[in-house]
Amino acid sequence: MERGYNELRWNPLLGCWVIVSSSRSTRPWRRVERCPFCPGSEETGFGWDVLVLDNRYPALRPDAVTSRAGSGLYRVERAYGYAKVVVETPSHEGDLDTIPRENLVKYLRVLAELTERYCGDPEVAYVFPFRNKGEVIGVSLTHPHSQVYVLPFVPPRVEREYRMMVEHRESTGACLLCSILEQEEREAERLLYSNKYFTAFLPFFAMWPYEVHVYPRSHVESLAELSEGEVEHLADALRVVVAAYNKLFGFSLPYIMAVHQKPCRGYAGFHLHVEFYPVHRAPDKLKYPAGIEWGAWVFTYDGLPEERAAELRSAVQRAVALLEGRGEEVLGRAVEHA
Ligand code: ZN
Ligand code: ZN
Ligand code: FE
């Protein structure tokens, strides 16, 4: 691995860390001649179905070196951690809806194992699995893969979610996500898909046009706590959501997938969930986070979430038919029109 500096710089104005890594600036962007994730490359070898690799240009590393000491307001820490890549299949093309089902189940088990393993390290605060798909999201490699960032701090978004969960518990005695799910199930008009253990819906409070959340239906706090049956049902729900995205406009839809789980220590009561943010608002239009979003952290939503949920619900129905037509067993059911 190429050396450089890997440090955390504290943003005193917003109260959050920025990960600074000097070696990443040389990373190639879409100029790879031979796929590094296909079997038989230097890093991959042969004889695997799901493979965990080190990111070649890690933002965080266990032997991180800082470029300077902190001074005054400007705190500097080592960017201690890991940047892993999880290659989900030996096949060069595909998505979570086309890779073999067993791979998807195994992939989730791998994420759970990484969470458990790295949370055992006292310097690690959070294990963050995420998946970026599509050129418009800047993904330089098309071979299906996810990333896992092992962080020495809890990400602000997770902190914020937890603060809201605590406030809700203090005022009502209930888990916030359990309550959101209850309300979504009661109102029904934004529900998309449900199996025994997981429900997918476009939330009332969506920020991205086709944002989808997948929640465990009973209270589970982290990937590492999922039972075998729950892992299979999470794989099923993710598969249906991604298949629906790819049916929505008739092309393979770019998206960001983020796993929000309980940090390594403390944060009791956190409710695990997966969030998807596709960047399209129409087949030929992207939603650009711009002045109002970046400049003010205020999201504007074009259209009504309920209308977009209806479009996605019809895509889910087509996706379920497609998966069943391929001879696959779908474990849940598309929610009928509300
Ligand atoms: Zn490949
Ligand atoms: Zn809950
Ligand atoms: Fe979340």
Image (cartoon, grey):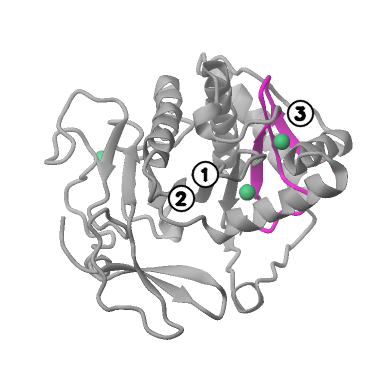
Q: What amino acid is found at the position of numbered circle 1 in the picture? A: Arg
Residue 264, magenta (yes or no): no
Residue at image coords 82%, 32%:
337
Which one is earlier in the sequence, the residue at label 3 or at label 2? Answer: 2
Q: Which residue is mark 2?
A: 125
Report the side of 252 relative to 297 (left or right): left
What is the spatial separation of the Cα atoms under label 3 and label 2, in whole angstroms? 37 Å
Q: Secondary structure at mark 2?
A: loop
Magenta residues span 190-217
Task: Kindly identify the amino acid type of the residue bearing the numbered disc 2.
Answer: Ala
Give how far across and how far down residue 139 sits, in percent: 37, 55
Q: Position of residue 208 (x, y in %)?
A: 65, 57
Can you tell which quarter of the image residue 268 is in? Answer: top right
Q: Residue at x 23, y 62 (%)?
A: 28
State which image quarter holds ligand 2.
top right
Identify which residue is drawn at 86% across, 49% down.
171
Q: In the image, which disc is placed on residue 112?
A: none
Q: Viewed as shown, does residue 321 lie left or right of 80?
A: right
Q: Residues within 10 Å of mark 3 (few under 14, many from 20)?
A: many
Query: Are dots 2 and 1 in contact, CB under 8 Å?
Result: yes
The residue nearer to you, when weighing 238 against 22, is: 22
Q: In the image, which disc is placed on residue 265? A: 1
Circles 3, 2 touching at the beta carbon (< 8 Å):
no
Question: Label 3, on which residue?
Answer: 335
